[in-house]
Image (spheres, rainbow, N blue to C red):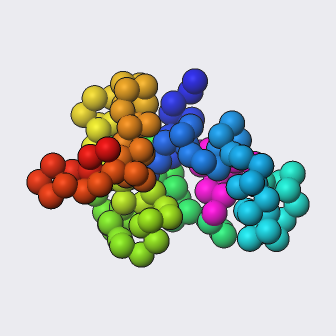
């Protein structure tokens, strides 16, 4: 698997995303098609770097920024972390925005391959299903 191609510049693990073409369910595909008012067959995602963020209408400012700066990931930028990665409570239950910064820090520290193969799925699972224990982080 090409982890660089399937990890967004901002640290989202596209290969684990519910919208990624190999992971999406028929039920979610129908829901997205109805929401976006598009045909069912057009609801497919090849990952951010290939097809852009499927939930975003228009261009991604973060992706444009890394392209302008000539880096592959946000953590390679001399302004990391910036406002594009600022945590936010709005829609935190539905979107993975708040764990992007953590992912990028882990990628920077241990490398993309080790993060992707050994940590990314667990990080996503802890974010989605963990119970926050103050001082410990999310526990499963």
**What residue is rendered at 42% in x and 67% in y?**
92
- Return the residue found at the far left: 135
Is residue 129 highlighted in magenta? no
Point out the stretch of residues depicted in magenta: 44-55
Which quarter of the rendering shows the N terminus? top right
Residue 85 position, x and y percent, is 36, 61
Using the image, determine if residue 82 lies above or below residue 75: below
Residue 13 position, x and y percent, is 49, 42
Residue 33 position, x and y percent, is 79, 63
| Residue 104 shows in the view | no
Magenta region's main secondary structure? loop
Report the front residue among 45 and 95: 95
Q: Quadrant of residue 59?
A: bottom right
Is residue 45 highlighted in magenta? yes
- Return the residue found at the far bottom: 90
Which quarter of the rendering shows the C terminus? top left
| Residue 24 shows in the view | yes
Using the image, determine if residue 62 lies above or below residue 13: below
Horizontal relation, residue 52 to residue 16: left or right: right
**What residue is rendered at 73% in x and 62% in y?**
32
**What residue is rendered at 36% in x and 60% in y?**
98
Horizontal relation, residue 18 to residue 124: left or right: right
**What residue is rendered at 71% in x and 55% in y?**
28
Q: How many marks?
A: 0
Horizontal relation, residue 98 to residue 59: left or right: left
Report the front residue among 120 and 93: 93
Using the image, determine if residue 71 lies above or below residue 61: above
Using the image, determine if residue 46 lies above or below residue 133: above
């Amino acid at each position: 698997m090409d982890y660089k191609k399937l990890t967004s510049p901002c640290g989202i693990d596209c290969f684990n995303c519910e919208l990624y073409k190999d992971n999406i369910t028929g039920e979610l595909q129908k829901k997205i098609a109805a929401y976006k008012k598009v045909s069912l067959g057009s609801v497919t995602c090849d990952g951010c770097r290939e097809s852009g963020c499927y939930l975003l209408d228009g261009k991604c400012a973060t992706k444009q920024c890394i392209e302008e700066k000539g880096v592959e990931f946000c953590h390679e930028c001399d302004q990391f972390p910036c406002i594009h990665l600022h945590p936010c409570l709005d829609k935190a239950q539905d979107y993975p925005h708040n764990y992007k910064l953590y992912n990028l820090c882990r990628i920077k520290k241990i490398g993309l391959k080790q993060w992707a193969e050994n940590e990314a799925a667990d990080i996503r699972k802890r974010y989605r299903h963990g119970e926050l224990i103050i001082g410990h982080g999310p526990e499963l």
